Amino acid sequence: MLEKKMEGINTDEVIEEFEALTKDAGMVQRETLERILEENGSAEYLQNLGLNGRTDPESFKSCVPLVTHKDLEAYIYRIADGDPSPILTGKPIPNMSLSSGTTQGRRKLVPFNDELMENTLQIYRTSFAFRNREFPLEKGKSLQFVYSSTPGKTKGGLGAGTATTNLFRNSKYKNGMKAIQFQCCSPDEVIFGPDFHQSLYCHLLCGLLFREEIQFVFSTFAHSIVLAFRTFEQVWQELCDDIRDGELSSRVTAPSVRMAMSKLLKPSPELADLIYKKCSGLSNWYGLIPELFPNAKYIYGIMTGSMEPYLKKLRHYAGELPLMSADYGTSEGWIAANVNPKLPPELATFAVLPNIGYFEFIPLNNDAERLYMDPKPVGLTEVKIGEDYEIIVTTFAGLYRYRLGDVVRVAGFHNSTPELKFVCRRNLILSINIDKNTEKDLQLSVEEAGKLLAEEKLEIIDFSSLVDLSTDPGHYVIFLEITGEPSEEVLKECCDCLDRSFIDAGYVSSRKVKTIGPLELRVVWRGTFQKILEHYLGLGTVVSQFKTPRCVGPMNSKVQQILCNNVAKTYFSTAF
Ligand code: AMP
């Protein structure tokens, strides 16, 4: 029997706390809004809106407009540039987070403060408690594919890094992570290493050195886990050599990383032989993760939304090991925790923590509102099961009625707080005229084409899309990177299948009357999506934060260029 109390955290207590908090989520929301507005009442932004000290939801909604990041940019830049006056928050903002920029092509700066840090720990603690009740961990370490960017400074001297970098560098975070057994088997020098390829190699090496102790495998987004084990397939023999000789490969050049790794490495021919034997015995790498890490209990990371396309490959590496989807949050702030860890990622839901922010929801099930007009948000406890909403957040870090741009579906309630299913990003829409296809629609269409390829034992490595309006009529372009060499025939079938699988009535009718042209499939060379990743790393995004842009708008010209310059084959649909 495992102790419930581990290093300072009592999982039963955390669960009880969460149950109490969600009993009357409506009341907790009112109190939370009151706290946010009291703490930040002196901020210029709120002062200008004429709240005059009122903290009730009705006054808040009537005085404070719904905003997007663009509306707040001028305020955020003043803070970043060093204006010390209370602009968005009462207390000064110590750090800025940089969003990944993978959806818009441009990284957004958003405020980060101690309260967001506390929210992060609360979310992690909560989902850990539920997870550990179902899948208890023993003492040990975890293999984490995490990477930290070198934090920069804004013009005004504030720390500026990715949200995860802001976490990794915070001492409270380290202690909090210890309490939930989130100790990474790799030394800090690897996490903070200057080159992600070298860090990835060393994470793998550390995982192997501590293989018996590894309790779970983690990355913020599932993409990084798949990338790590795809890399493993390429470098496993080199890793075995390093272990055998106790010498780090010359591919790792960063002195800090080499130094840290030299403290862990010593010649271990037996371990090298064992790993060699295990890898050689696998069939097409199926079940690689449990084979390498015999005591791992699960694989953990965000696996929902734009990560779903990687699940198939992840399951292949995971064999029988459960996949557990991590919580729902953004650089702007956290939203909800996965308190039903037994659900497979496709069904994962996230229960909103009613004390970490004030949440509103724009109903999307009626057409006028779908078109962005006159949104009428409802409160956290007013949402209805089965309906879709765009989520609006008010945070402790100075964002008020801020449109995150995410679409969620209410799957149910945990006590009185909703359990959300992540649907897609609202702005990721393929649209030419009356057609509307979301990221999810694109994913489903690509999944259908993937089935045709699977019959030939081929896989889709990654995909993206754009709307090409340079032709008349305009048409959808889907980019696929595929393993192996599919035949012409299969690729033609895939192209037709992609076109047919967009079942949105606006698309189908437009295709029939030819106001949308035949869908174009562009197969790109192997390594193209790696180039896109490298491009984002060049902009300062870290791998842990990276999400492949699924629809590349004109704002994202560099990614468009990478995709278009790497096309190996092109096909046009004959489906209509
Ligand atoms: P970033 O702003 O770069 O931190 O990315 C945040 C975005 O990642 C969110 O707005 C979501 O679109 C996506 N995201 C975060 N958590 C999840 C999750 N659990 N499931 C699906 N998508 C998520």
Image (tube, rainbow, N blue to C red):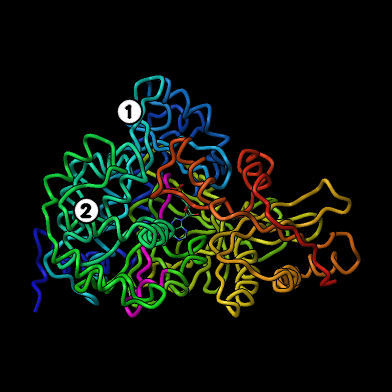
Quarter of the image for the N terminus: give it. Answer: bottom left
Element type where label 2 sits in the image: helix
Q: Residues within 10 Å of mark 1 (few under 14, many from 20)?
A: some
Please provide the residue range marked out in magenta: 314-332
Which residue occupies 50% across, 69% down? Answer: 410
Which residue occupies 74% across, 55% down? Answer: 431
| Residue carrying label 2 | 242
**Residue extending furthest right?**
513
Which residue occupies 18% across, 41% down? Answer: 171
- Separation (CA) of disc 1 from disc 2: 48 Å
| Residue carrying label 1 | 92
Asked if residue 329 is among those painted magenta in the image, a careful observer would answer yes
Picture quarter containing residue 355?
A: bottom left
195 or 388: which is nearer to us? Answer: 195
Which residue occupies 21% across, 40% down? Answer: 258
Picture quarter containing residue 185?
A: bottom left
Residue 415 in view, yes or no: no
In the picture shown, does residue 268 fall above or below 281? above
